Each structure stands twice: as C-alpha cells, then as structure tokens.
C-alpha cells in the first residue's frame, strides 16, 4: 500500500491501551531544585527530576512566572536528538507553566548536535513492543502526570507542544493521554510512513531505519509493521482534542503532503498553519501556538 490514507493495525487500540496502562502505573516520584537554574527573563526556571518506566530517572526543567498558581501549562516535547531543549520563546509563554525533559537521562540543559552514530531511530525497531518510541511515549506520558501535579498548574488546562519528533509525540499524547487537552504539533514526524519507506530514503536520521532493515531477517516487513503502530497519520485518527498542525512549504523531512494527510485524519477541532520555509523553527509559531492554547485551555466553569 502506497497511500497517504490511515492504515491502522487491527490491534492498534489494544496495543496502546497496554502502553498507557504501564505508564499510568508508574508511581509519581519527582524532585525540584527549588532554585533558579537558568536565566530566562520573566520566569523562574527550576530543574526537575522524575522517575519513569523501568525505574529510569529523567532530568528536565519547569518554567513559570513569579507567583504562579493554577495557571494553564504545556509539555514541550523535544525534537529528534539527544539534546535538551532550553527555555526560550518557543518553550515558554507568559501566563503559562511549561515543562521539558531529556529522553535519554542527560541533564536538563544538555546540548548535543545530531550525528549518525548517536542516532536511535532503529533501536528495537524489529517489533512494536521493543521500539524505543514505545518507551519515549511513556516518558512523555509520565512527564504530563508530573506537570499536572505541580502547585503552579491548573490540572485541567494542560496541552502539549513540539516540533518534528516533538510534534508527532504531542499528537500521540493528544490521542492517548487524558491529561492533554490541546495540542500544537509543528511539522510532526512519522506521517504516512508506508509511502515514505516505499520510496528512496536518503536523508538521516530517517535513513537509520532503512539501514537497519538490511541487518535483520525480513527486515523491511518487520520495520513497516512496527511503524504502523506509531505512524502519526494513524495516531491522528484517535486524537480528539483540539489540535493545531503546521507545515513548511519547503520541508524535505515532514513533507507538506504528509502533514495535510495527518490534518485530514484528525476527527475533531483542528487548524493548519502554513509557513513558507523548511523544517525549522519559525518566529510566528510563538504567537500562533499561544493563540491556540489560549482558545482551548480556557478555565472551566466551576
């Protein structure tokens, strides 16, 4: 099949219910630094550690305005790579609490540029139960639970945002994490992978997957099966919270036609933003994403 229509596995919902159940069973265990660990004007930034699945300790940060109590909040999910996101205009908003973390146990402000040797796309890709993104989703799910538990946060007004990998995982959270009430997914990754893998994949990091296919028996069929459970196009069919997507008209990584297909698959309130450039941060994202969260994380009537 070479289409850009969803192709959801028969046991898709059962698979993800099991993934969610494991993440829900993780005991909340976190520690904040209670100090200003990063200088970002208008915010207190504290480091935060929490335990996730497999008893792993992950590091991140929480940013909030001085005197914050019961504010809306969002989880800021990192793009592909092993580095941490830094608090900046994209990862914070006035009047909001935000949390971000490092998926690989590095420090809250760890910086590391992508090199092929440090890629992880192929880790465990022979099965949907062992692919690294299963665990990474559970880490993001646990981080949402930690964010919800903070005194500065209104537990009923939490969203998820990110770009590329972070955008894709944000859509997954919108599909499966009841804490997440709105999503901003900029140029989300892993959309329409059946068609992508059926073509000539020459760009890293995605080529890590096709390289891996050649190293295991029946590699292409096994990897395609794995990805079908994570494909953001399939995930979008289950994402019923208000979701804003963006595409870059010249994006070679998350191609415009795949983003449009993801958008079409979303069943509920949605918006598509279009940027002229490629697969990169665009300054209008700051205001556009803020506007979407403002509209869809309103206080409930008590």
Image (cartoon, rainbow, N blue to C red):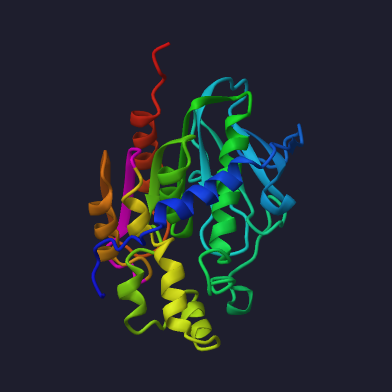
Note whether residue 173 is visible: yes
Which residue is at 53% across, 63% downward? 80
Which residue is at 55% across, 88% downward? 215
The quarter of the picture where residue 244 lies is top left
Which residue is at 59% across, 22% downward? 68
Total numbered labels placed on residues in the image: 0
User: In x, y percent, where is residue 173?
Assistant: 46, 46
User: In x, y percent, where is residue 213?
Assistant: 49, 83
Note whether residue 41 is visible: no
Compared to residue 297, the image places residue 118 above or below, namely below
Is residue 243 in the magenta section? yes
Compared to residue 301, the image places residue 2 above or below, namely below
Is residue 279 in the magenta section? no
Quadrant including the C terminus: top left
The reply, left or right, for residue 57 in relation to residue 210 is right
User: In x, y percent, where is residue 298?
Assistant: 39, 24
Closer to the camera, 115 or 300? 300
User: In x, y percent, where is residue 83?
Assistant: 62, 60
Q: Which residues are magenta?
A: 240-252
Compared to residue 160, the image places residue 299 above or below, namely above
Quadrant including the N terminus: bottom left
Closer to the camera, 48 or 248? 48
The quarter of the picture where residue 124 lies is bottom right
Which residue is at 32% across, 53% downward? 246
Closer to the camera, 273 or 180? 180
């Amino acid at each position: 099949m070479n289409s850009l229509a969803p192709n959801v596995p028969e046991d898709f919902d059962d698979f993800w219910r099991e993934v969610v159940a494991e993440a829900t069973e993780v005991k909340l265990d976190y520690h904040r630094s209670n100090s200003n660990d990063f200088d970002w004007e208008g915010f207190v930034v504290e480091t935060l550690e929490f335990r996730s699945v497999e008893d792993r300790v992950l590091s991140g940060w929480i940013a909030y305005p001085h005197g914050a109590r019961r504010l809306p909040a969002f989880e800021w999910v990192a793009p592909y790579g092993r580095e941490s996101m830094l608090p900046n205009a994209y990862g914070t908003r006035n009047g909001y609490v935000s949390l971000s973390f490092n998926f690989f146990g590095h420090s809250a402000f760890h910086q590391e540029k992508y090199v092929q040797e440090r890629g992880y796309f192929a880790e465990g890709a022979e099965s949907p139960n062992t692919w690294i993104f299963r665990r990474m989703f559970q880490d993001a799910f646990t981080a949402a639970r930690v964010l919800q538990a903070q005194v500065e946060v209104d537990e009923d007004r939490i969203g998820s945002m990110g770009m590329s990998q972070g955008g894709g995982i944000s859509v997954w959270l919108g599909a499966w994490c009841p804490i997440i009430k709105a999503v901003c997914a900029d140029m989300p990754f892993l959309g329409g992978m059946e068609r992508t893998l059926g073509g000539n994949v020459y760009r890293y990091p995605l080529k890590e997957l096709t390289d891996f296919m050649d190293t295991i028996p029946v590699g292409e069929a096994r990897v395609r099966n794995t990805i079908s459970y994570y494909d953001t196009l399939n995930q979008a069919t289950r994402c019923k919270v208000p979701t804003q997507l963006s595409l870059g008209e010249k994006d070679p990584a998350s191609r415009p036609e795949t983003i449009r297909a993801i958008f079409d698959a979303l069943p509920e309130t949605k918006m598509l933003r279009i940027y002229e450039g490629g697969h990169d941060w665009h300054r209008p994202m700051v205001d556009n994403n803020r506007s979407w969260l403002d509209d869809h994380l309103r206080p409930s009537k008590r």
